[in-house]
């Protein structure tokens, strides 16, 4: 099956924990910036209908990238929170003629190491799903609940805990409506799935690779440099 999909890449964050001179998606590793690596994970896929990259309104870096002139990619103004940026991206897709029933994948700009096999598995697993879902990874380590004093209160049952990754895949119209309602009502939305859950849906988890990491700290860049340059 060749599932067709639109792509939204929220890239309007600053990435303060990287403590760099520019937003983390514009840091270079293995010869290109993170956002270019991230878009590369999708641009060769035959199911891609088009993409929106959501960047800060005054972002001076995006127009300098070669990929910014790819005819399949639109730019949208990102918002205050990640969810505002995603909503702006979804609205842009509708304005570009995308249908409410179409699938949309939302993928963090800061996750440049998405494996082709994971993207394929997500699309295949959810192609006929009534809700949609997301790539996720079962937690590996023992989990502790911590008190205000920095001491362990309890050990949490990890057998039912998964880490939510991206891409997250939902029907465009439903996701847009749900995100819009959740934001209007002041709900904290940390990923698309949490908005869908708030609206009463049960997104499906599709197990992915743990190395689809979100670049958050300087050591993540060193890790990517090492694995990409040793291939
Ligand atoms: O900050 P964090 O790494 O959780 O952000 C996840 C993704 O959301 C990043 O790709 C970031 O650029 C994006 N984001 C956004 N708009 C915001 C905040 C974050 O597009 N206001």
Image (tube, rainbow, N blue to C red):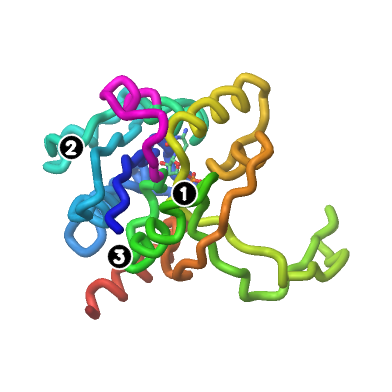
Label 2 vs 1, first from the N-terminus:
2
Callout 1 crowding tier (Cα within 10 Å): few <14, some 14–19, many ≥20: many
| Residues rendered magenta in the picture | 91-105
Mark 2 lies on a secondary structure that is: loop
Residue 36 location in percent, x, y? 23, 50
Residue at 29%, 30% in the rendered image: 59
Residue 70 location in percent, x, y? 13, 38
User: Would residue 160 be visible to someone looking at this image?
Assistant: yes
Relative height, residue 142 to residue 4 (above, below) = below
Question: Is disc 1's CB within 8 Å of ligand 1?
Answer: no
Residue 52 location in percent, x, y? 30, 34
Residue 217 location in percent, x, y? 46, 58
Relative height, residue 171 to residue 169 (above, below) = above
User: Would residue 27 be visible to someone looking at this image?
Assistant: no
CA distance for labels 2 and 1: 20 Å
Mark 1 lies on a secondary structure that is: strand
């Amino acid at each position: 099956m060749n599932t067709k999909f639109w792509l939204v890449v929220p890239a309007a964050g600053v990435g303060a924990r990287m403590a760099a001179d520019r937003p983390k998606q514009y840091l270079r590793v293995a010869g290109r910036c993170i956002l270019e690596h991230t878009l590369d994970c999708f641009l060769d896929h035959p199911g891609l209908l088009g993409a929106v990259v959501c960047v800060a309104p005054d972002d001076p870096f995006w127009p300098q990238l070669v990929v910014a002139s790819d005819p399949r990619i639109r730019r949208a103004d990102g918002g205050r929170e990640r969810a505002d940026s995603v909503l702006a991206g979804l609205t842009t897709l509708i304005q570009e003629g995308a249908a409410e029933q179409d699938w949309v994948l939302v993928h963090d700009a800061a996750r440049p190491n998405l494996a082709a096999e994971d993207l394929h598995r997500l699309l295949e697993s959810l192609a006929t799903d009534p809700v949609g879902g997301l790539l996720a990874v079962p937690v590996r380590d023992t989990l502790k609940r911590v008190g205000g004093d920095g001491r362990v209160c309890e050990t949490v049952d990890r057998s039912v805990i998964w880490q939510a990754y991206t891409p997250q895949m939902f029907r465009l119209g439903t996701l847009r409506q749900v995100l819009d309602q959740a934001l209007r009502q002041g709900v904290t939305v940390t990923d698309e799935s949490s908005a869908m859950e708030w609206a009463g849906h049960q997104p499906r988890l599709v197990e992915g690779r743990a190395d689809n990491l979100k670049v958050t700290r300087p050591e993540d860049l060193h890790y990517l440099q090492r694995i990409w340059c040793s291939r």
